[in-house]
Amino acid sequence: MAPAVRLHSVVLDCPDPRTLAEFYAAVVGGTPEAWEGDEGWYVLQVPGGPRLAFQRAEGLTPPEWPRADRNSQQFHLDLDAGATWEEFDAAHARVLELGARPLDLEDREKKDFQVYADPAGHPFCLCRVENASS
């Protein structure tokens, strides 16, 4: 059966679209661009992946990870940090250098992932992915 639609963009609300687009460009690649000159909306075509968009939302309250009862995360991005712990550790160091904040670094060997917040407070995971088809 054919799908009803195709995914166009994943859009993240944030107080500063340019800054968050630049953060994710440094993490996953691509070049952020203001949409039609609008500084309140940036797009980032991830090489070999989806388009991420960043929309200005004044007064945004970041999710309270891991709460589900109030101001929950709604969704998060899982990012492939490589197949080895060496690759994972390099990705960990890089996202921290870029401004990510650790949220959950416990039991990585059991879970194969760790949770961070981007500069706007959105949770995302670095995942150790042994098989690229997973």
Image (spheres, helix red, strand yellow):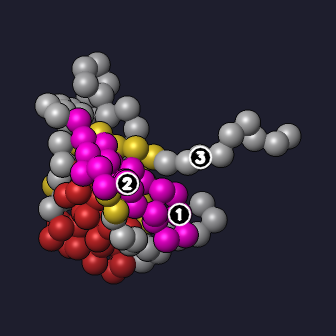
**Which quadrant of the structure image shows residue 61?**
top left
Rendered position, 59 above or below 28? above
**Which quadrant of the structure image shows residue 24?**
bottom left
The answer to whether one can see residue 124 in this image is: no
Three-letter amino acid code at disc 2?
Glu
Three-letter amino acid code at disc 3?
Leu
Closest to the observer: 46 or 123?
A: 46
Q: Is residue 37 magenta?
A: yes
Marks 1 and 2, how far apart in space?
A: 22 Å
* Disc nearer the start of the sequence (3/2): 3
- Tell me residue 84's x, y (percent): 42, 77
- Tell me residue 132's x, y (percent): 58, 69
Q: Which residue is mark 1?
A: 49
Mark 3, other Cα within 10 Å: few <14 / some 14–19 / many ≥20: few
- Tell me residue 97's x, y (percent): 15, 70
The residue under the point 15% across, 62% down is 99
Closest to the observer: 130 or 101?
A: 101
Which residues lie in the magenta part? 35-57
The residue under the point 17% across, 53% down is 119
- Left or right, 2 with reference to 19: right
**Which quadrant of the structure image shows residue 43?**
bottom left
Q: Which residue is mark 2?
A: 36
Q: Are marks 1 and 2 in contact (CB under 8 Å)?
A: no
* Disc nearer the start of the sequence (3/1): 3
Q: Are marks 3 and 1 in contact (CB under 8 Å)?
A: no
Q: Which residue is mark 3?
A: 7
Mark 2, other Cα within 10 Å: few <14 / some 14–19 / many ≥20: few
Three-letter amino acid code at disc 1?
Gly
Residue 101, labelled with which disc? Answer: none
- Tell me residue 120's x, y (percent): 19, 47
* Disc nearer the start of the sequence (1/2): 2
